[in-house]
Amino acid sequence: MIHYQLQCSDGHGFDGWFKDSASFEKQAQHGLLECPVCGSVKVDRALMAPSLPRKGNARTEPPPAPPPVSAKEPPAPASGPSGQMTAAGHIPDHVRATLQRLRAEVEKNCDYVGPAFADEARRMHRGESDRRGIYGEASPSDAEALAEEGIEVARIPWVPRADG
């Protein structure tokens, strides 16, 4: 998967994850990308700082350990009549809808590898398995070990499906 910094026509910045650059272009062209702040569908890639490794693919400093990727439903937090709650409070409807669309895209375009996520990510990194989008579960220590090996992973908030 590819991570892009995105920006809407009103200047709001946000992240986006895509199977490949062509997937981003197709979604942007068809107005399928939406700003989570204002709802604008005029979205483009923002300038991003490149991550330049040293000669021999060694990094100058280790990357921060990303949180684990999880496909399990999080425990249901307490919620009131106004909707789903998180530790930080109510999830606005437009944010929940965006996360539901993200989940649907991940499930549609990536392979679920379950608890074998860290092992499969390593196989792909070493060229022992075809490179493709995957999702599954990884413990915090597995995610940290992957980051130390130069394998980028990211945690996506996994909200209940829109149809469920």
Image (cartoon, rainbow, N blue to C red):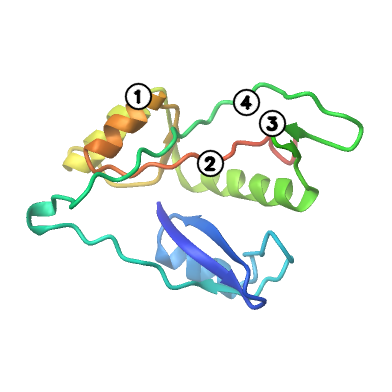
Q: CA distance from mark 4 to mark 2?
A: 12 Å
Q: Position of residue 150 (x, y in %)?
A: 24, 43
Give the mark nearer the N terminus: 4 vs 1: 4
Disc 4 + disc 1, Cβ < 8 Å:
no
> Residue visible at 22% across and 48% down?
61
Mark 3, Cα crowd under 10 Å, few <14 / some 14-19 / many 20+, is few
Disc 4 + disc 2, Cβ < 8 Å:
no
- Looking at the image, residue 57 sits to the left or right of residue 17; the answer is left
* SS label for mark 2: loop
Nearer the camera: disc 4 or disc 1: 1
Question: Farthest residue toward the bottom?
Answer: 9
Nearer the camera: disc 4 or disc 3: 3
Give the mark nearer the N terminus: 3 vs 2: 3
Question: In the rendered structure, which amino acid carries the disc numbered 2?
Answer: Ile
Give the mark nearer the N terminus: 4 vs 2: 4
Question: In the rendered structure, which amino acid carries the disc numbered 4?
Answer: Pro
Which residue matches tag 1? 141
Disc 3 + disc 2, Cβ < 8 Å:
no
Q: CA distance from mark 4 to mark 3?
A: 12 Å
Place residue 19 in its image quadrant: bottom left
Which residue matches tag 3? 87
Q: Position of residue 3 (x, y in %)?
A: 43, 56
